Image (cartoon, grey):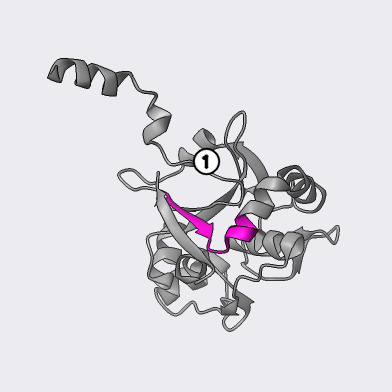
Amino acid sequence: MKKLILFILLALPLRLFALELKVGDVLLQPRDCWSCTLIEEQEGTIYSHMGMVIQVEPTVQVIDALGKVKISSFEQFNSGTQKNQKISVLRLRREDAVEHLQENRLEFLAFYLNYFDGLKYDHDFLWNNLDENDEELMYCSEMVTKLLKGFMGVEVATRSMKFDKNRDAWIQYFRGNPPDGKIGNSPAVFEQSELFHEVGEL
């Protein structure tokens, strides 16, 4: 009998034991790189990057800003996760907001494609930064913040940014003076925000 129960458990689809992702879920990601370590130590978190689920069927697709704003498969996004670490999955607390995103997922995707897809990455972490063609440059948490606000009016907090920890390294990163006091945010702001709750890890 015990062998039969074990066989049934092993035969069940693995997806029954996996977290069910939804459109709009925020993925906080630990990464292993020099600038990632600077961000994590400055913000007091293990997360230096983030993305958002934009599609769940037929496959999970994730949007993020790294190199440029783009859509990737979850597998591609997850390949950047630091070894022996996990992605934290955050979801909006407001159930009506979560339902709105599921019911209007195609409109949400279209909004993203029209206004965000393909924008260049902002290495300078400036909130309103334009390239030579007057197109906005964006970093990961900025993109998700502006996407949520633009599509459904959800306002994730911004704050006066600091670059006081590992100061010499920050000066090296910015090739000069860091943008102290400029408005911005980071994955840590999402991690601490009361707008979201963690639904699991991947």
Q: Between residues 104 and 181, which one lies in front from this camera angle?
A: 104
The span shown in magenta is: 87-98
Q: How many marks?
A: 1
Question: Residue beneath label 1, please?
Answer: 77
Q: Residue at x 43, y 53 (%)?
A: 199
Left or right: 76 in relation to 128: left
- Quarter of the image holding residue 81? top left
Specify the amino acid type for callout 1: Phe
Q: Residue at x 60, y 76 (%)?
A: 158
- Give x and y (percent) for residue 129: 74, 67
Left or right: 183 in relation to 88: right
Quadrant containing the N terminus is top left
Q: Callout 1: helix, strand or loop? A: helix
Quadrant containing the C terminus is top left
Find out whether residue 185 is within the magenta segment.
Answer: no
- Give x and y (percent) for residue 123: 62, 61
Left or right: 21 in relation to 45: right
Left or right: 13 in relation to 101: left
- Give x and y (percent) for residue 89: 46, 52
| Mark 1 crowdedness (10 Å alpha carbons): few <14, some 14-19, many ≥20 | some
| Residue 30 visible in rendering | no
